Image: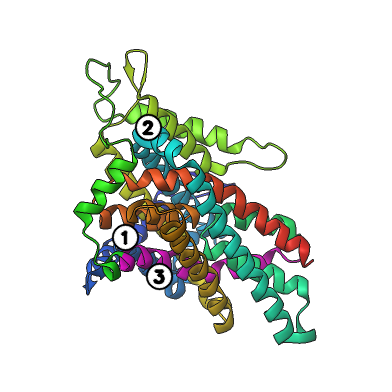
Amino acid sequence: MVLFGGILSVKAITFLLFFVFSIAAVGYLLGRITIKGVSLGTAGVFIIALLAGAFFYKFLDAQLMIKAGDVSKSYTNNALKVVENMGLILFVTSVGFIAGPNFIGNFKKNFTSYVMIALVVILMGGLSCAGCIIFDNKMWGSERSIAQSAAMLVGLLSGSLTSTPAFSAAKETAGEALENIVSVGHGIAYLYGVVGVVLFVQIIPKILGANMAEERKKIVVADDGSSEKKSLKNLIEIDGFGFMAFSAAAVLGIILGSIKVFGFNLTTTGGCLVIALMFGHFARIGCISITPKTETLKVFRELGLMLFLIGAGIPGGANFVKYFEGVYFIYGIIMTTLPMIAGYFFAKYVLKLSLLNNLGSITGGMTSTPALGTLINTAGTEDVASAYASTYPVALISVVIVSKVLIMMFN
């Protein structure tokens, strides 16, 4: 099989899949452990992937080279990028379809709220990052330039918000001389960026003693009183599971995400989310159904999240060990925690949003794919995906702009 200019043998692919599914098996076992009602859930897969990357990355790399029959080339990063992107497409497209039926009504009612939450979260992240840049530069004095501190800290910001578009934008703006520093920062902060938000959306309901049955009623009311999909009776289904509709949405989403306007594009994540929302909302083209079965979407959502976390976690674990410094990890904690807290209290006391609308919008504002998966399980309803889908695009654009501005300000 040809993969990014290299050839991976069947043995190499088989070994990679063995490695991936071994991580998944152990990760789900870890995620099942519950302490005082709080568990890692699918994020347990991410923890095991990080550990696998930290301790076995070189082994995996060597095995792939040997089984490919060429020890002069490393295939691991590219192979894992395929796993990560496949997972991302499956997850985000599923979320779009799930949120689609209620998206328009929810968005119309809460448009201003979602925009404001996204801006509060991202601006707080940007201010936290700017403060850390100034502090870091003063602490290190002449040992590190302000541009180097900015590159590292903006990388930390993108990792704290688990935002690939912000990461890419920061590397591009920093330039060739500093892009590796951005990568290091992203890798260090990514761990808490994932786990922190996953724990947040579970701990807040526990602290409040929230009755999820009552909270689900509130979010249903916010979504025009119905969480049911539009009736698809008497429509022609191309295939029983809805694979055609799902695949079509993914293809169109990838195309849309690749289109650049004034140097900005939605990326694969944003493109697939937008197209799937449209498919989910309209549900049909004439007499043809373009909505997959609910069971299909649930399986793809979970499978996609698992693959995404493994694909991102293994190289993240390798970089985390290689470049870890305690002070940078603390910066990352600050840049993850402060935006979440600010967004939560703003939504609760200023916008008066219900708990699940609040937390759903926080996962979107933090651009946190894993946290949404956790929140759906915690809330016991797919309806929280509407708040995520409404907030995410604003946060996506905002974090890219903030990352570029910070690099330019301190360059």
**Picture disc at residue 77:** none
**Picture disc at residue 246:** 2
Of the residues under marks 2 and 1, which one precedes in the sequence?
1
Q: Main secondary structure of the magenta part?
A: helix
The quadrant in which residue 256 appears is: top right
The quadrant in which residue 227 appears is: top left
Q: Which quadrant holds the C terminus?
A: bottom right
Q: Badge 3: few (under 14), some or many (20 or more) residues near its Cα, within 10 Å?
A: many
Residue at x 26% of width, y 54% of height: 379
Looking at the image, is 108 positioned above or below residue 282? below
Q: Position of residue 371 (x, y in %)?
A: 38, 58
- 319 in the magenta segment: no
Q: Amino acid at mark 1?
A: Thr
Kindly identify which residue carries mark 3.
52
Kindly identify which residue carries mark 1.
42
Q: Which span is picked out in magenta?
A: 176-204
Horizontal relation, residue 138 to residue 126: left or right? right
Q: Nearer the viewer, mark 2 or mark 3?
A: 2
- 198 in the magenta segment: yes
Q: Position of residue 233 (x, y in %)?
A: 22, 19
Q: Position of residue 6 (x, y in %)?
A: 56, 49
| Camera-side residue of 233 and 94 | 233
| Camera-side residue of 141 and 383 | 383
Please indicate, yes or no, whether residue 261 appears anywhere in the rendered image: yes
Pointer 2 with pointer 1, Cβ within 8 A: no
Horizontal relation, residue 97 to residue 377: left or right? right
Residue at x 25% of width, y 34% of height: 228
